[in-house]
Amino acid sequence: MEIETAIEVFVRAFTLVRSRTHPYLLDRVEGIWRMHDAPRKRNVRSEGFVAIDIPPERIHEIVSRHATDSYHICVVRRVRESDRAIRSGFRALGYRLITTEPLFVNALASVPEFSSSLPVRRVTTIEEAEALRAAARRRQIPAEHLGVENAPVRQYVAVEDEAPIGWVQSISTLGATWCANLFVKPEYRRRGVARALLSKMLADDRDFGSSASVLLSSRAGALLYPAVGYVRIGELLAYSPGQ
């Protein structure tokens, strides 16, 4: 998968998830992806701009013309490219680096099987979704996607005594999938739960026709994902205006 396609999978999946409570729109302005609230009395969510292969000064000019509210800028670099020009350019413009996240792609050519001592399954019922909502303290999957075999949003959980202790989500777009919100409770980590969750999710991704799975990772997560077939293709650097 080309890195530009991976970025589009990311922005389309991200806006889909954020549209659950109010439409979060996606468009392109002068070669940059723009994510923003649909019109309402007061925009309460920050606009997001995502760019690749555009110098910081040019990104700043474009965003300054199109941003209507608070915003952040995400710049993606290829894995073999230096981030020096990006960092120095945005620093000179007065931007603050918020975070960096490695960008991974799994081509799903071969999905390794990992098991766990705890059951791993797909969430298919209202009861399972409600148990997950209570554990995660927020709703993870809309009711309309439950029980639909090839739903655009699929949710997976690991459970102990029927209580969710880990979860991950797969979102379909552009013939690929976006892996989101992988989490395992701290007391259950280093027991193979995350690998088992990913293995189950990726096998379903492949079986349902996905061409690849894409994700952004924390630094800690970056040590996990290669074990289940993900390859790092780039890095996202997120900036906010001001010091």
Image (tube, rainbow, N blue to C red):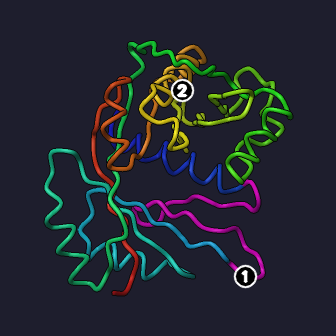
Sequence-first disc among 1 and 2? 1
Quadrant position of the C terminus in the picture: bottom left
Whole-angstrom CA distance, mark 1 to mark 2, is 39 Å
Relative to 117, residue 104 above or below = below
Rendering quarter of residue 3: top left
> Is 112 inside the magenta-drawn segment?
no
Counting other residues with Cα less than 10 Å from the Cα at mark 1, is it few (<14), some (14-19), or many (20 or more)? few
Rendering quarter of residue 1: top left
Of residues 57 and 46, the one drawn nearer to the viewer in this rendering: 46
Q: Give the range drawn in magenta.
A: 20-43
Q: Residue 124, can we see it?
A: yes
Q: Residue 182, can we see it?
A: no
Amino acid type at circle 1 is Arg
Relative to 166, residue 26 above or below = below
Identify the mark at residue 42; answer none if there is no mark: 1
Identify the mark at residue 219; answer none if there is no mark: none
Residue at horizontal 66 percent and vertical 68 percent from the top: 37
Residue at horizontal 56 percent and vertical 48 percent from the top: 12
Residue annotated with mark 2: 197
